[in-house]
């Protein structure tokens, strides 16, 4: 079943082709949907997800060092569209960053004098994943529909609520990892605006521990590669007005 789910995830058309060829006896798409939708996914945090996380960690029997985890924060672009949820009888696909952040966005729009835009379609998904520091835990914890212009200020309430919920479950959050996007750097900077480099902050739920901030290493390597390959300036060489390449590192 896992192999079938992986193949369908890569290409639904390829899965149908293999299944119709009769080379392999594969389950139908409907059967695979029953496996993938065993629990209802919602935008934001969920007590059901907390229960599943505790079962994955085996919080009552795991060793003390296996309770140390980190939070990975990332945004991915999604296709703007609406989906009808027949169970809750509502449309999904609008921006939803939680009740507090939604009200802050509405207040900011009203104070700026801009025209109020209700029900703006989401362009990205903000995803929070819990990773074990001394275990193989890799658990998608929460998701929020957002926009590509979402400011790092709004991440503050989301990320620290995740820290609070994980600490209440008995886990110990040791680090937060995000890529080098502007909104993520803004989120790190907010913890100490007067420091040139912010790499940690006190854990309000356990004063004896710090929460450390890390930039995603693969993203930093990709950024370095892009600087080498794309950031090229044309400089005019006076007085002959010849042009030379200058690579910016």
Image (cartoon, rainbow, N blue to C red):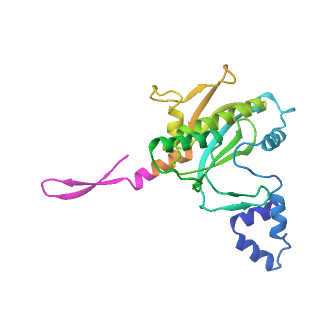
Q: Quadrant of residue 134?
A: top right
Viewer-proximal residue, 38 or 28? 38
Q: Quadrant of residue 9?
A: bottom right
Tally of marks: 0
Q: Is residue 188 left or right of residue 230?
A: right
Viewer-proximal residue, 144 or 86? 86
Quarter placement of the N terminus: bottom right
| Image x and y of residue 2, in percent | 80, 59
Which residue sits at x=64%, y=42%? 72
| Image x and y of residue 146, in percent | 59, 50
Can you name the residue that lies furthest to the left here? 239
| The stretch drawn in magenta includes residue 104 | no
Viewer-proximal residue, 96 or 37? 96
| Image x and y of residue 139, in percent | 74, 45
Viewer-proximal residue, 133 or 209? 209
Region rendered in magenta: 226-249
Which residue sits at x=48%, y=51%? 115
| The stretch drawn in magenta includes residue 237 | yes
| Image x and y of residue 170, in percent | 78, 30
Q: Is residue 235 above or below residue 73?
A: below
Which residue sits at x=76%, y=74%? 16
Q: Quadrant of residue 187?
A: top right
Q: Is residue 177 above or below residue 168?
A: below
Q: Is residue 78 left or right of residue 50?
A: left
């Amino acid at each position: 079943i896992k192999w079938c789910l992986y193949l369908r995830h890569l290409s639904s058309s390829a899965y149908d082709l293999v299944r119709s060829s009769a080379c392999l006896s594969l389950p139908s798409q409907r059967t695979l949907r029953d496996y993938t939708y065993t629990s209802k996914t919602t935008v934001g945090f969920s007590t059901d997800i907390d229960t599943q996380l505790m079962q994955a960690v085996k919080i009552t029997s795991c060793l003390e060092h296996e309770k140390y985890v980190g939070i990975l924060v990332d945004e991915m672009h999604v296709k703007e569209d609406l989906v009808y949820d027949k169970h809750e009888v509502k449309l999904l696909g609008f921006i939803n960053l939680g009740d507090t952040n939604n009200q802050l966005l509405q207040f900011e729009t009203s104070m700026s004098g801009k025209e109020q835009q209700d029900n703006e379609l989401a362009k990205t998904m903000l995803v929070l994943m819990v990773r074990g520091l001394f275990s193989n835990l890799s658990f998608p914890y929460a998701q929020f529909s957002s926009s590509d212009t979402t400011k790092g200020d709004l991440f503050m309430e989301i990320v620290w609520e995740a820290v609070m919920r994980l600490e209440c479950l008995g886990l110990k959050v040791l680090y937060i990892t995000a890529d080098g996007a502007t909104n993520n750097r803004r989120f790190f900077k907010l913890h100490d605006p007067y420091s040139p480099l912010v790499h940690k902050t006190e854990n309000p739920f356990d004063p004896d521990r710090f929460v450390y901030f890390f930039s995603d290493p693969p993203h930093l390597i990709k950024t370095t590669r892009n600087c080498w390959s794309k950031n090229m300036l044309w400089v005019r060489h006076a007085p002959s007005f010849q042009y030379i390449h200058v690579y910016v590192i």
